[in-house]
Amino acid sequence: MYSLDHQYHGIVHIIGPELGITQPGMTIVCGDSHTSTHGAFGSIAFGIGTSEVEMVFASQCILQPKPKKMRINVEGKLQDSVTAKDIALYVISQISSSGGTGHFIEFSGSAIRSLTMEGRMTLCNMSIECGARGGMIAPDEVTFEYIKGREYAPKGEEWETKLAQWQQLKSDDNAVFDAEFTFDAADIEPMITYGTNPGMGMGVNGTIPTGENLVGSDRITFGKALDYMGFKPGEKIKGKKVDYVFIGSCTNGRIEDFRLFANFVKGKKKAENVTAWIVPGSKKVEKQIREEGLVEIFEAAGFALRQPGCSACLAMNDDKIPEGKYSVSTSNRNFEGRQGPGARTMLASPLMAAAAAIAGVVADPREI
C-alpha cells in the first residue's frame, strides 16, 4: 500500500504493471471492475465485490462460477492513428455492451500481437465494457521484455525459471471456444461514442445510427440515450462542439498515452472553448512526463498537468463535467452522470482527444 505522498502512489491498475507486481499466470482480483487490465500479461484478472474482497483477505481463495470462453481475433495491419482504444471501442460496437456477458475473452491475432504492453492493457481494461468477466492476451516476448528489470519482477535464476513457465502460457492450437469472432484491422478507424454505453460507438467519419432496426425496450433505450446526449439519428458526429477533454484513467493514463498526446499537440494550441485535464495514472507516470519534457509541450499548447489519480473518469474530487457540457474522454465509461450529473461523455483514444482539444470540435486526427 502506497500512501498519497509515496513515489509509487497511483491507480492500482497502473502501478501493479509498472512495478512488476503483475505477472503471467497469476490470478488477480480487486474491488474494481477494471481489474481486467492485468489480463494483458496472461493473468486471470477480474473485479470482485467488497464482500468477496473480505473472502480473499481471509482465505486467499474465492468462490466463482466458471465463465464461458470467448476468443476475439483481430487480424491485419491497423490504419494510421488507430490505437488499442479504437480496437476496443470497435469490437464493443460490433458485439454490443452485453455481447461478452458470462464469458472470459482471449484476444489474439496479428493486430493484437503488434500492440505494445500499454496498448494491450488498454484493450483488456475495456473487455469488461462488453459485459465480459475479463480479458486476456497470451504472454510473449513483448510481455517478458516489459516485466524484466522492474522492481518486483523475478531476478537472476528465479527469472529464468519463471520465464520457462510463462512461455507455456498460451492456448493450444486445437483449443475450442464457446464463442469466437474475427475482425479485420483495416476496417477500424478512429472511434468515438455517441450514446450512453460503450457499445454505442462509431468511426469518426460515420453517421449516428437511426435505430430503425431496433424494437421494444432497445429502441426506447436508444432514443433515451440520444436525448440525453443531445444528438439526432442520422447526423454526423464530426464537427460537434467539445467543452472538455480528459486524458487519463486506468484505461489511458500511462506514459505511452501522454507521449502520443504530446507528439500530436506539439507546436499547436488548444481551442479557447476547451477545458483540458491532463491526469497521469500514477506518480511514476507524472515523474516520467516531467523528465521527458512533455509538461513543457503541454503548457506551451495551453494544457495543465494535474495530480495523478482517477479524476474525471468518475467525477472524483472537483474534476466534474458540468451539466449539459460535452467531454471527449479517454476513460472507459460514458454512462449518464458518470463524469458528473448531466455530463455528456464521448469515449475516444488519446489521439482523438488531442484532435478535439485542438479543433474545439470532434475531429479526425488524420486531418489535422
Image (cartoon, rainbow, N blue to C red):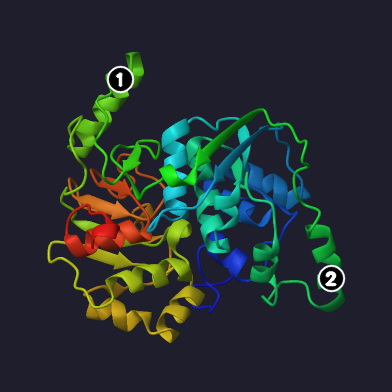
In the picture, measured across the screen, residue 229 lies left or right of residue 305, that is: left
Instruction: Quadrant for the C terminus, please.
Output: bottom left
Label 2, secondary structure: give it.
helix
Kindly report the distance in space between the C-alpha atoms of the residues bearing marks 1 and 2.
56 Å
Instruction: Quadrant for the N terminus, please.
Output: bottom right
Give the total number of marks visible in the rendering.
2
Mark 1, residue position: 219
Q: Residue furthest top?
A: 216
Q: Nearer the viewer, residue 37 or 313?
A: 37
Position above or below: 254 against 34: below
- Number of other residues with Cα within 10 Å of mark 2, as a class: few under 14, some 14 to 19, many 20 or more: few
Mark 2, residue position: 160
Residue located at (47% from left, 54% from top): 84
Residue 48 location in percent, x, y?
Answer: 60, 43
Q: Nearer the viewer, residue 367 or 298?
A: 367
Residue 273 location in percent, x, y?
Answer: 13, 62
Residue located at (72% from left, 57% from top): 24
In the picture, measured across the screen, residue 200 lies left or right of residue 6, that is: left
Q: Is label 1 or label 2 in front?
A: 2
- Mark 1 vs 2: CB contact within 8 A: no
Q: Nearer the viewer, residue 346 or 27?
A: 346
The reply to whether residue 97 is in sight is no
Badge 1 amino acid: Arg
